[in-house]
Image (tube, rainbow, N blue to C red):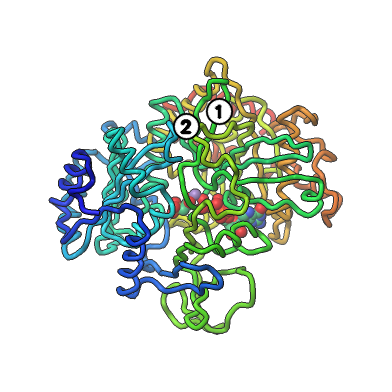
Amino acid sequence: MKLEDVGSDKIKNWVNECAEFLMPDSIEVIDGSDSQKQLLINTLKEQGDLYDVDEKFSPNSYWTRSDPNDVARVEGRTFICSKSESDAGATNNWADPKEMKEKMTSLMTASMKGRKMYVIPYIMGPISSPYSKCGVQVTDSAYVALNMLIMTRAGSDALNRIKKEGDFVECVHSVGVLDKEERYICHFPEENLIMSFNSGYGGNALLGKKCFALRIASYLGKKEGWMAEHMLILGITNPEGEKKYICAAFPSACGKTNLAMLVPPKSYLEKGWKVETVGDDIAWLHFGEDGQLYAINPENGYFGVAPGTSSDTNPNMVSALKKGNCIFTNTAYNKESKMPWWDKMDGEKPSKLTSWLGNEWTPGSEEKPDHPNSRFTCPASQCPTIDPNWENSNGVPISAIIFGGRRAKSAPLVYEAFNWEHGTFVGATMASEMTAAAAGVVGKIRRDPMAMKPFIGYNVGDYLQHWLDIGKKEGAKLPKIFHVNWFRTDDNGKFMWPGFGENIRVLEWITKRIVGKVDSVDGVLGKMPIIQDINTKNLSVDENLIANLQEVKTSAWKDDIDSQEHFFKEIGDKLPDVMWREFKALRARLGI
Ligand code: GTP
Ligand code: SPV
Ligand code: MN
């Protein structure tokens, strides 16, 4: 579609302003038609950037690689440009909005020379939901445009909504020359503006996802009384046919996609347990008129971690991928069979591959064939367990919120917060071992409040206050809050809990707690399950497993308490007093 034909002066003027300094050779508006999508695919193929995937494995799917220096989010290069530095807070890099805009404009000047600029109108959320919000992204990457068509509702529907509402988040993106030193991902929350330069991968470049749906949206949520969270959304139905919806916040690459698509083990399926998927990464939560929190999934696709995805761990994801229309990025690729390959994928490991670096790979090669943060983009509707309400305009009512992370030694398998304020503290003191989803040291423990450390678009202290305020809303029927840990290890470093489908055993306890069907015991960290209430039937594990997983060792908490205190001090004046009160209470209960 031509820019002249968009029928919105607001979009036209803004795009022209962008074009003035980006200086593209031509401009094309994404309408989402099949023919246009095919042109994007052809463009990338002609450039040698996109390869066919075997039709029998996944029709209409492609394999590609990103630049080796551009494989994950770059938190060190990500900025919140609020007028006041204190509005960015301790967890964000801050830059003055005026200075940063000037810098970005100057850096990006003429960056689209010789290239086409794609204009992508898109909606985050179901097309006609009152809770959805619109964006327009300009980009010089056909790869980004193709991915945005999967991850968001992009094209004519979005354009029509923007024409009606007039409002959109301005998203300026150019891959530039992928210069790592001059890579910037900048957010201007007070201006509904995002500018991203010199990256073409994932959360740095698909600006609807982390930049808009979390950083900008969390700021809007604070202002408007709702919440944007790094949470999956699932529906769980018990054998009596009672269904509950649950959100869960785990840091990047800590199991959200897997939990959202959980397949119950045979013994649970036979009894009639069912898990359905609403979203796997982001939830926008609003109060309904009945005082409950309702969640929508703002996304339209999955940008999932490939390594570890198999029929054993996540058969629903595998089925969704096999339906086609996917893009595999930075996995390995078998040029002969046209098959992507990643660690723990189903089937035999081929003896010859093209690695994610583009090199010939054989079993003797030093490099790994796939990148640990290699991912696929896949339409959400293709998930076999997609929930019938996943596009419900009002969202789904949430009965529980779960926090969790990778904790080798300290956190038990599951516990429940005493109440909303304590639950907010449990979320605020989350920590996890870092993964390959972001540039940094993999395995290093870091504090990650509500799995939102890299995604809160404002001051973390104000964010925690917002959580407390949500809890004080008159007439609120709040979800119960829980904490889980699938990643506790034994003395040999092996995961103690089988995880994946077996996680339903923990969800079962949680759903029973929601309706008060089981009791709990007050413990040091929160309300603990009675060991026998976690069902281990048909699970071939040590009979003391649950007791061992639930054990809270004071010695393992000493460092954590110190690090919590350190983190709270870093947050500074804006940390709500309630957090210090909860911290002192926890320390007293631990006796350290
Ligand atoms: P992002 O997309 O980065 O936000 O990640 P995510 O939170 O959706 O994580 P995902 O479900 O993709 O899982 C990341 C990695 O953790 C994969 O390699 C999974 O196989 C592994 N994983 C997920 N769930 C479990 C579990 O219950 N136990 C164990 N041991 N590993 C798990
Ligand atoms: C994450 O890192 O949490 C992701 C991938 O979901 S990205 O889109 O790169 O943020
Ligand atoms: Mn994520």
Nearer-the-camera pick, 44 or 42: 42
Q: Secondary structure at mark 2?
A: strand
**Quadrant of the image for the N terminus?**
bottom left
Quadrant of the rendered image holding ligand 1: bottom right
* Dots 1, 2 in contact, CB < 8 A: yes
Is disc 1's CB within 8 Å of ligand 3?
A: no
**Residue occupying image coordinates x 28% and y 31%:** 84
**Residue occupying image coordinates x 51% and y 24%:** 470
In x, y percent, where is residue 363?
56, 83
Q: Residue furthest top?
A: 474
Badge 1: how crowded within 10 Å, few (<14), some, or many (20+)?
A: many
Counting every numbered tag in the picture gives 2
Q: Secondary structure at mark 1?
A: strand
Q: Residue furthest left?
A: 20
- Residue 424 sits in quarter: top right
Which mark, by number, is residue 293?
A: 1
Q: Which residue is mark 2?
A: 227
Identify residue type, mark 1. Leu
